[in-house]
Each structure stands twice: as C-alpha cells, then as structure tokens.
Amino acid sequence: MFAFICLLAIASAIDFNTWASKNNKHFTAIEKLRRRAIFNMNAKFVDSFNKIGSFKLSVDGPFAAMTNEEYRTLLKSKRTTEENGQVKYLNIQAPESVDWRKEGKVTPIRDQAQCGSCYTFGSLAALEGRLLIEKGGDANTLDLSEEHMVQCTRDNGNNGCNGGLGSNVYDYIIEHGVAKESDYPYTGSDSTCKTNVKSFAKITGYTKVPRNNEAELKAALSQGLVDVSVDASSAKFQLYKSGAYTDTKCKNNYFALNHEVCAVGYGVVDGKECWIVRNSWGTGWGDKGYINMVIEGNTCGVATDPLYPTGVQYL
C-alpha cells in the first residue's frame, strides 16, 4: 500500500514537472511543493468535471498551478461607470456561420503574460482583423504594438498593466495611431510612453454593437472581428480546454465583465451555437488559444459590450 501511494506521488510529480517545463515555470523548493499541491488539486477537479461535463478542462494551460483566487487577481479589466459611444444597428441578415480564421484574416495568438493588458490585445486583434479584411496584408506578419497602447493610453483612462478598456485604446488611436510591434516591442510591464514612435495604422472611429443583441453581433462579425468582454473568473474558464463552454456561475452584466478578448466568428460546436473567441494567454491555453462560448443565454457576457473599429487604415 505504501509503495502504491509513493507511485501515485511520483506520477503526480512527473506530471507537474512536465507542466512546469512546458510552461517555463520556475519555483523555489518550498514554492514548488505548494504549486505541485495546487496543480494536483486542479488535476482532480479537471478529472472529476471531465467525466460529467459537456466541454473539456485541462491542466495543460498556464494557470494549472494557481488557485482560482490567485488566478482572478490577474483579471484587471474593471468597470466603474457605464460608457457612452455610438451604437449602430446594421440590420442585415448574417450567414449561418462565420470564421475569419478560415479566410486568413486573423493574426496569430498573442500572450499578454503577467501584465493586465487584455484590453490592448482584444482591441488590437479586432483592428488587425479589420485591416486585413478591408485593406489587405499578411496575417502572419501584421502585428500592432500592444506595448504602445499599454504605455500611452493612461490619459484616455487606462491603467497600464492594471487594466483598462478597449474603447480608450480606440480613442487614442483615432488621435495618434498605433505603432508596429517591431517598432515598440511588448515587455509586459509598465513604463513611460515613447512619443517619438512612428504610427503604422489608424482609425477614424469605433462602433458599439447593440447590447445583448445576438443578431446584431452576428451581423457585425459577418463584416469583421469584434472586441468583446467576458466574465472570466470561473475555475472552468481558467482551465478550459475544448468544446462548447457554458457556465451558470459566470455573470453577464456590464460591471461583471473583467477580461477583454476578441470574437472572430460563430458556428456550431458539439451541437450548440457558439461564439468563437480569441484569447491572449498564448496557444497553451484553451483550444490553441481560443474558446467556444455558447451563444444561448449570453454566456459570460460576450454580447454585453461588443465594439469594433471603423475607418481602419494603414499609414
């Protein structure tokens, strides 16, 4: 019996070590013991859920050795007041499904790392997609600078690595434009805004999709990528792997939204209609960096505060 328990402990340790190596995690000896225990706890939760759940969880991702409380501290997109903005009804019939990845109009998955800069990744992913759709370019090489937006949009209401809103990013780009990643590389940390960087792209405005309107969000997605926000606080979101995600514990009201992402389309997954949502936690999280979120019931608020840039242009 003792030998059996030892074998289980060794197996768990090997699993944890493999995860740590894959995710480039390094811990002190004491911290490693704690992280292994949390990893094993999450692994048990994943195993239990996957036996009965309608979608799959995994401990392959970057947050597998974090408690849910620790993970939630990373969600920095806080909302304190209702935003104003132009709301536009497109009033068009959208197709049954849309996936801009299949059209080569979605840039590669990015990784925001430990910086609370999701608002820059969600908003710029939508801008990159609409540039590709409307103005052309190469999805594999187009890369706008999130760092530029992290450091330079404080006067527009954002807080660097401590959160912000994509609408504030768009307000900045309307006036100043946004640089290329190669001209203003991402560091994942707060610093001073560089004012002598050449802008590469610009917009003339942005449009809010009518709130909680499935038909209008589909219509907007039929024309391009859309910046959306979600309540990502659940342990199921933290450890999501694949399938049609739904969670009765996540909220969909405006002030509950705490993570900004980008919708790239919609379609049927495992018999359920879903939004196809691009995250900014690297390809090791979720379904190669994506999550399919059930449309019915406005799962986690995808349709609560969507917006997209207009008048996109290269400079």
Image (spheres, rainbow, N blue to C red):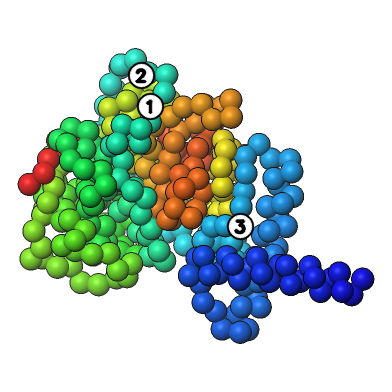
* Residue bearing mark 1: 98
| Relative to 202, 285 lies left or right | right
Residue located at (68% from left, 52% from top): 46
Q: Earlier in the sequence, mark 3 or mark 2?
A: 3
Give the residue drawn at x 69%, y 45%. 50
Residue position for label 2: 94
The image shows residue 158 at horizontal and vertical percentages of 29, 58
Confirm or deny contact between disc 2 and disc 1 (CB under 8 A): yes
- Residue 90 position in % (x across, y down): 28, 21
Between the C-alphas of marks 3 and 1, the distance is 30 Å
Relative to 31, residue 123 above or below = above
Residue 267 screen position, x and y as percent: 46, 27
Instruction: Place residue 45 in its image quadrant.
Output: bottom right
Does residue 167 show up? no
Q: Nearer the viewer, mark 2 or mark 1?
A: 1
State left or right for residue 277 relative to residue 136: right
The image shows residue 230 at horizontal and vertical percentages of: 46, 44
The image's mark for residue 229 is none
Q: Going by the image, does 24 lie left or right of 155?
A: right
Check the image and report above or below for 8 versus 300.
below
Residue 5 figure quarter: bottom right
Mark 2 to mark 1: distance in Å?
9 Å
Q: Which mark is residue 59?
A: 3
Q: Quadrant of the N terminus?
A: bottom right
**Amino acid type of the residue tagged 3 in the rendering:** Val
Q: Amino acid at mark 2?
A: Ala
Q: Which is more toward the observer, 163 or 31?
A: 31
At label 1, the amino acid type is Val
Callout 3: 10 Å neighbours few (<14), some, many (20+)? many
Q: Could you classify mark 2 by the number of other residues whose Cα lies within 10 Å: few (under 14), some (14-19), or many (20 or more)?
A: some
Q: CA distance from mark 3 to mark 2?
A: 37 Å
